[in-house]
Image (spheres, rainbow, N blue to C red):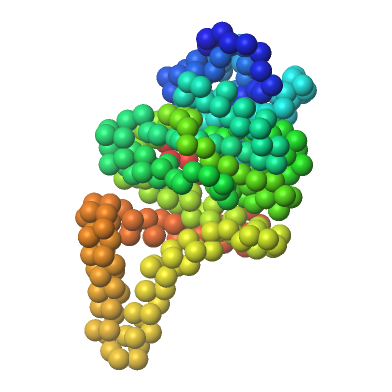
C-alpha cells in the first residue's frame, strides 16, 4: 500500500476466499489509512495477507447467519473503536480495487456537503470481455450521477450519518445498501453519486449457474427489503421488481391455467405465446442472448422471493446466498 498523508477516513473491506482480488483491493489503499478487513471463514491466505499489510482483521463467527451487512457492521465497529477520530468510512468489497484518487475525491465532497450521508462513484468491471455475464454486470454499474436514492456496496459514508441510522441491518442478505440509504434519507440526509472513477470490480462470472444464483439472491433481497420498508413507512423499495418477477412467472402460468379451465387445454399455450412475445420485444432492444437471460432471470428472482416467503413462514433466518 502506497504512502500518503493521514486523512479523516478509514476503510472497511470484506471478503471470503478472494485470493488475488483481495490483494489488489488492499494494495490499492494508501498505507497511512487505517483498514479493517472482515473475513468470512476464508480457506485461502486472505487473513494472513491482510495481517501482513497492516489491516485490522476481524474474523466473523460463522455460527451466526452470515450477511455482507453484518460483516460491514462488525468491520466498522472494530475500525471506529481503534480510530475514534475518523469522520468518514469507505466500504469496499474484497473483489474490488479502489481507483486512484477516489478516496480523496469522496472525502472532499463529503466535507463540502455536510448534509450528504454517503457518496459513491463509477464502478466498472475488470474483465467485461471475459464472459457475457461480466459484460452484463459492467452495464449494470453504469447508473446516473447526481443525487440518488441509494449507493451500492462500495461507498464512502459519513460516520455521523451511519451511526444516526444505526448502520446496516445485519438480517439483510441483499439490497442492504438501498435499505440503509432509505433510513438515512428518512432522517434528512442525502445520497450522492459522483461522476468519478471509484472501484474496479471482478465479478468472475463464467457460468450460467453463477448468474442464476446471483439473480436468486436479488429476488430474496427484493422481498426482504420490500417487506421491511413497507412496514417502516416512507419509501417502499423494490415493489416494481417484485411485481415484474411475479407477473412474468407465476402470473402468466396462473392466467394460462385459468384460461385452460375455462376454454380447454389448448388455452395453456397462452403462456409460451406471451413469453415469446416478450422475448422478441427484449431481443429487438437488447439482443437475443441478453433477452434470454433477462427472461430467465425473472424465474430466478421469483425463486428467491419464494425462498424468502418460506423462510419467513418457517421462522428461519436465511444466510447469504453465494454465487461464487
> Does residue 317 appear anywhere in the picture?
no
Residue 90 lies in what quarter of the image?
top right
Q: Is residue 256 left or right of residue 20?
A: left
The C terminus appears in which quarter of the rendering? top left
Q: How many marks?
A: 0
The percent coordinates of residue 128 (x first, y second) are 31, 35
Q: Nearer the viewer, residue 284 or 219?
A: 284
> Does residue 192 appear anywhere in the picture?
yes
The percent coordinates of residue 134 (x first, y second) are 33, 38
* Residue 267, above or below 166: below
Q: Is residue 134 left or right of residue 39?
A: left
Residue 137 lies in what quarter of the image?
top left
The percent coordinates of residue 69 (x first, y second) are 62, 40
The residue at 35%/91% (across/down) is 262
The residue at 44%/23% (across/down) is 21
The percent coordinates of residue 293 (x first, y second) are 31, 53
The residue at 72%/33% (across/down) is 159
Residue at far front of view: 112
* Residue 173, above or below 94: below
The residue at 59%/56% (across/down) is 224
Residue at far bottom of view: 262
Amino acid at each position: 500500500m502506497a504512502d500518503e498523508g493521514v486523512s479523516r477516513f478509514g476503510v472497511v473491506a470484506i471478503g471470503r476466499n478472494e485470493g488475488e482480488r483481495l490483494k489488489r483491493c488492499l494494495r490499492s489503499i494508501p498505507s497511512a489509512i487505517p483498514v479493517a478487513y472482515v473475513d468470512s471463514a476464508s480457506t485461502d491466505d486472505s487473513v494472513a495477507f491482510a495481517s501482513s499489510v497492516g489491516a485490522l482483521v476481524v474474523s466473523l463467527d460463522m455460527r451466526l447467519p452470515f450477511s455482507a451487512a453484518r460483516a460491514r457492521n462488525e468491520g466498522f465497529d472494530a475500525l471506529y473503536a481503534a480510530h475514534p477520530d475518523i469522520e468518514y468510512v469507505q466500504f469496499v468489497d474484497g473483489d474490488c480495487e479502489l481507483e486512484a484518487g477516489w478516496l480523496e475525491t469522496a472525502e472532499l465532497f463529503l466535507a463540502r456537503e455536510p448534509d450528504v450521508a454517503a457518496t459513491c462513484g463509477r464502478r466498472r468491471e475488470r474483465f467485461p470481455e471475459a464472459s457475457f455475464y461480466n459484460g452484463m454486470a459492467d452495464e449494470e454499474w453504469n447508473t446516473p450521477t447526481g443525487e440518488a436514492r441509494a449507493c451500492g456496496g462500495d461507498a464512502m459514508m459519513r460516520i455521523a450519518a451511519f451511526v444516526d441510522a444505526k448502520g446496516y441491518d445485519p438480517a439483510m442478505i441483499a439490497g442492504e445498501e438501498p435499505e440503509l440509504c432509505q433510513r438515512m434519507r428518512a432522517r434528512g440526509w442525502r445520497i450522492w453519486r459522483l461522476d468519478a472513477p471509484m472501484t474496479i470490480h471482478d465479478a468472475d462470472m463464467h457460468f450460467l449457474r453463477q448468474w442464476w444464483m446471483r439473480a436468486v439472491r436479488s429476488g430474496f433481497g427484493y422481498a426482504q427489503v420490500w417487506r421491511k420498508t413497507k412496514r417502516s413507512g416512507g419509501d417502499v423499495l423494490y415493489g416494481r421488481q417484485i411485481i415484474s418477477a411475479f407477473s412474468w412467472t407465476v402470473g402468466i402460468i396462473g392466467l394460462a391455467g385459468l384460461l385452460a379451465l375455462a376454454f380447454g387445454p389448448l388455452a395453456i399455450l397462452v403462456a409460451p405465446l406471451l413469453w415469446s412475445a416478450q422475448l422478441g420485444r427484449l431481443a429487438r432492444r437488447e439482443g437475443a442472448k441478453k433477452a434470454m437471460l433477462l427472461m430467465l432471470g425473472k424465474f430466478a428472482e421469483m425463486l428467491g422471493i419464494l425462498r424468502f416467503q418460506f423462510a419467513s413462514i418457517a421462522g428461519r433466518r436465511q444466510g447469504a446466498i453465494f454465487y461464487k
